[in-house]
Amino acid sequence: MSEIVNQCLLRSRNYKFRDVILPDQVPVLIGRGPQTKIRERKCSKVQVQVTADYKLKNAIILQLGANPSEVDNKILVSGEQIEVSDGCSINLIENDLKYTLEFLDSEHATRPRHRSRSNPKSIHKKLKVESPSSKNENEEQVNGSISSEDNEEGCLSEEAAASKEEQKVEVVPGDELRRREIECKLETMRKAVVDDFNSLTTENRWEEYDHSKIFIFTPAGLRGQNKIAAFDMDHTIITTKSGKVFPTDMSDWKILYAEIPGKMKKLYEEGYKIVVFTNQKGISRGRTSAPEFKKKVERIVQKLGLPIQVLVSTGSGRYRKPNTGMWDYFVQKCNQGISVDVSSCLYVGDAAGRPQNWAPKKKKDFSCADRLFALNIGIKFYTPEEFFLGQKPAPYNMPVFDPRKLGASPLAVKCQPPPQKELTADAIVSSTSEVVIFVGYPAAGKTHFALTYLVPKGYIHINRDTLGSWQNCVSECSKSLSKHQKVVIDNTNPDPESRSRYIEIAKKFGVPCRCFFFVCSLEQARHNNVYRELQGPDDKHAGVNDMVMNSYKSKFKEPTLKEGFTEVININFIPKFKSIHEEKLFKRFLLEK
């Protein structure tokens, strides 16, 4: 008979931080503040949300803070959630603020803050169960995972706080009033964060987050709204005075169209919050001075005469459009706790995928990033000409690879020799010694395929990334075949020259040599590569740049039986997702064009 769980704790491994009680199926916000005694600024006041399930003995962790958390050595970025089980390791920030999830069959006292002056006689308080009319009185009791110390730091005197910390709580499980009170406390915490934000909006300010990957400008008096009118900056709100594509200096700008200030003012009067989202990769590359760029932004906002918030992506990665990192951060952190109604929002940008001469003498758009940014979020999109000048929508081209339309395909198809035949996972495996040579772009799914379908069936995995050179791969292949083992060569092998090395070894040992050709376009491989990078660090893969991708494309020769293969089998890319979050991320447009 399984044990009945009476309590769930997030147990701190550092005595100076407090444990956190997690009630059954009640979301609990955890972060910096009196609740945990954490003061580390990298940890947000609402770093994670944890929901424990006593029956299943697991919990759902949702990352809310800007700086990632770490769960069992997996990095958890903002907006991502993960299911964990009893005993898992949780670091509220990477490699620090370490906790362990514990499900208990009896209720244990949580750990108070360690102080040399602590009173050995702790005070016991019972939670009163009364009618709803006594709610106000009950809210002042120390309650499970959310204590009355969840006010902002400084609201209580040091001595009063010390007295509160010494209280031990006896929680009455399964009580509906207790659940309501916890929800009330959660709302109090949320309002506290909002009040804290409001208290800081009395003057213009710049903030930098996530190792300066994102800058945020917030003008004085700015208020959150549920309707957002969002804009790109360059060639949408402003253009260069010099007429050049890129500004010659920080003063080389002017408002793009005379209609822009009036149109934006009208949006503001209609209750929209005006927000700018701009890619500025030159900052991370050192080509653009961050202090000078910030001054430029302030002058543009001053020129428009409206309270406008500006979010700046300074490099590559999840914050750079068309990825939704900037928008996600804005919704979670920059709108004063007010939820955003996506159906009432709009976005205006010039990177819209328009071809050459979309209007007379107009150049083609350099990318489709702005249109795809709006599409990924799910909001209405306009070009500057459509929105500010009232022009009709211009023609445009979408990216060649559409991640939303990755249709169902068989895992593998034997193409040579004829006839073609669909193969299952079991049918692609040999029972005797052989060599399988992979052919395909970087990030085409080769290593995942090998580790999923071949290595568990006894194949020796040979990969240049781990062995260092093709000579080492050839040597390892020869050693494995001498032991009558099955071998898979997990390299790109784009041309007959790179493949012939292993075909000759197979002939030497008198074993079959099959080719597994991974059907994947350059555009899909680039998409997969970005997706892989956005998922976080991966020991099995290194980031691949466009030069490597294009090198494969230039060398590629389609494999044939004439090279010495016994079979050529096409492998289709079939993604596997561990969570809904991973699937949503993959099905977004991650490339600018």
Image: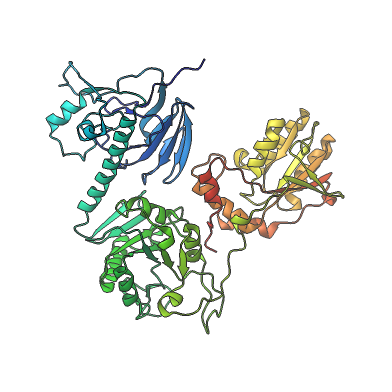
Residue that appears at 79% across and 39% down: 505
Left or right: residue 439 versus residue 92 is right
With respect to residue 468, does 518 lie above or below? below
Query: What colouring method underlies this structural image?
Result: rainbow
Residue situated in front as seen by the camera: 287 or 59: 59
Residue 533 x %, y %: 51, 48
Question: Camera-side residue: 263 or 45?
Answer: 263
Residue found farthest to the bottom = 360
- In the rendered image of this protein, does residue 337 appear above or below residue 395? above
Q: Position of residue 382 (x, y in %)?
A: 46, 71
Can residue 158 be seen here? The reply is: yes
Image location (x, y in percent) of residue 235: 41, 73
Q: Quadrant of residue 345?
A: bottom left
Location of residue 25 in the rendering, given as x and y in whole percent from the top left corner: 41, 32
Kindly tell me whether residue 149 is visible in this rendering: no
Left or right: 468, with 379 as reference point:
right
Q: Residue at x 16, y 39 (%)?
A: 154
Residue at left offset 74%, top offset 43%: 437
Left or right of 434, for residue 582 = left
